[in-house]
Amino acid sequence: MQRMTGGQAIVESLQVEKTAHVFGLIGSAGMEIFDALYDAKSIDFIGVRDERTGVHMADGYARTKGTAGVFLAGQNGPGATNLVTGLAQANAAYSPVVALAGSLSSAHVYRDAFQEVDQQALFKPVTKKTWTLTQTARIPEMMGEAFRCAMSPRRGPVLLNLPRDLLAESADFEPMRAGGLAFDGGFTGSRDSIERAAALLRGARHPLILAGGGVKNGRHHQKVLALAESLNAPVVMSPGHGDAIPCTHPLYAGQMGPRGNAVASDLARTADVILALGTRLGFNTTFYSFDNLNREARIIQVENEATAIGRFFPVEVGIFGDAGNVTDDLAAALRGHDAGGCKAWADTFMDRRKSFLAQLDADAGSAADPLQPGFLFKTLRDVLPDDCMYTMDAGTLCLQATDKLRYARPPALFTPLDFGLVGFSYACGLGVKLATPDRTVVSLMGDGGFGMTASEIGTAVSHGINTVCIVMNNGCWGAEKAYQRDFFGERYIGADVPNPPYDRLAELWGAKGFRVDKAADLAATVQAAVACGKPAVVDVKVDPNALYSFRRDSFKHRDKSA
């Protein structure tokens, strides 16, 4: 038995779980934990400037590393409420974030005490599980449950409230052990479902694989590519998962649907059998419409969340299982299959893909001013290394970028996904870099979103987190200004965003600042930022008139041209 305070027991639990980084913001409710962290040499504490952005760091770290990202909010009340947006984002991404929140002393609950808020009720809608510690002696049990719940399928964020009096109390603890996983996700479908799916794929003439988060998060790209080659099946990806397989493979088609490219989207509209691996066929992939899928296609849907199967589209075969394991079993069932009849389908796709990429470069134009988004994306394709990992914000510039960049080494793309959050990318990139320090990390943001999170430059400098943030500065909230232009008679309100020179702001924080006012300077400046060996911010002046209405479907009622 070992006698420890509750704060020491929390840190001991983190060490038992082999936690290498804890993101957090100090506060009086969690002081016992922070004091114990002082002695925990195996844990690197990353002090952040805001709880919301700190959770984005933990989110990026978790998605990259494939293990839980830990965030510690030291203050109850406002310190905890600031977590809501970050946890809602992690929840939408099924990201395994373990959030620990300082909480009111037990004796003060329901007394309208200082900074009192019902944290249990507050976080329940935006987490996989929220609960509150009731006894100091139960800390190992509760911490083990937090990690186990966050990491078990389907993964997601959890929050444990920690009353400050229980952190100060002492108790005797048995030697701790990791919470572990009762279930590691390695399950597959029934023999019958695998055989029925294999039979459909054998009979396909226009087979297509749609790879989603289940492929990317499980790092199953090699298995999926082997299956794709055996079927002569192109591989399209759901939006935000354009890195599910390497972009260098001949069968890579990029993102499909309303957020994707024309070639990939046409494949989904003309395929006769679609193998949907690790995807819900959700909003960003389909807009819940057969405009983006062949209504006559026979769909095989593989998901590790049973309720997602057939939820939005009827499926011929639904398989409740892990995308990697099901892919292995399908490959075994299809061994010896002759896909020669599908060669023309694959060859036609590859020719179209080649033409699409050539046209993408041609449409980007030359180094003319004002600088156009397409030229920026082409420059990034040309000059950034194959190991590059990208983080994105929401907004139309980033939405356009996701299918115009190169993702050569999965994982390589981290976006807000269905939460559509602005202010996510830069902080997420810091977490991604800590998880993979040897890879290049580039964060793309609009100027408005970067303004929300620029204070985390201080975190990057303090901890030597050398990412490159490219701020696409058009002086406005681009998506909304485009809608006001196209559907509301140019009645602009709240759309323009005056900004400081972000390169100079970066220098004031102690980072390296770069500025691009002319397109001709872009390539050399980006290369210099990557090579500078410091946290870097590149303020890129983008044509303010290069606006695009991404969600035209939302404003059909106002479209005068229809």
Image (cartoon, grey):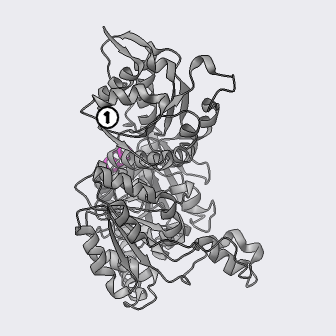
Q: Is residue 375 magenta?
A: no
Residue shown at the point (56%, 51%) measured from the top left = 315
Relative to 515, is 145 above or below?
above
- Residue 78 position by quadrant: top right
- Residue 313, image x and y in percent? 61, 54
Relative to 333, is 496 above or below?
below
Of the pair 508 and 70, the residue shown nearer to us? 508
Residue shown at the point (31%, 47%) measured from the top left = 332
Of the pair 205 and 253, the residue shown nearer to us? 253
Give the residue number, with chain letter if any, for mark 1: 19
Q: Is residue 491 left or right of residue 430?
A: right
The amino acid on which the numbered mark 1 sits, given as a three-letter code, is Thr
- Residue 498, image x and y in percent? 56, 73
Assign a secondary structure to mark 1: loop
The N terminus: image quadrant: top left
The C terminus: image quadrant: bottom right
| Res 427 visible | yes
Of the pair 244 and 381, the residue shown nearer to us? 381
The stretch in magenta equals 324-333
Residue shown at the point (64%, 32%) measured from the top left = 117
Q: Spot the residue most to the front.
A: 508
- Residue 548 position by quadrant: bottom right
| Res 338 visible | no
What secondary structure predominates along the stretch shown in magenta? helix
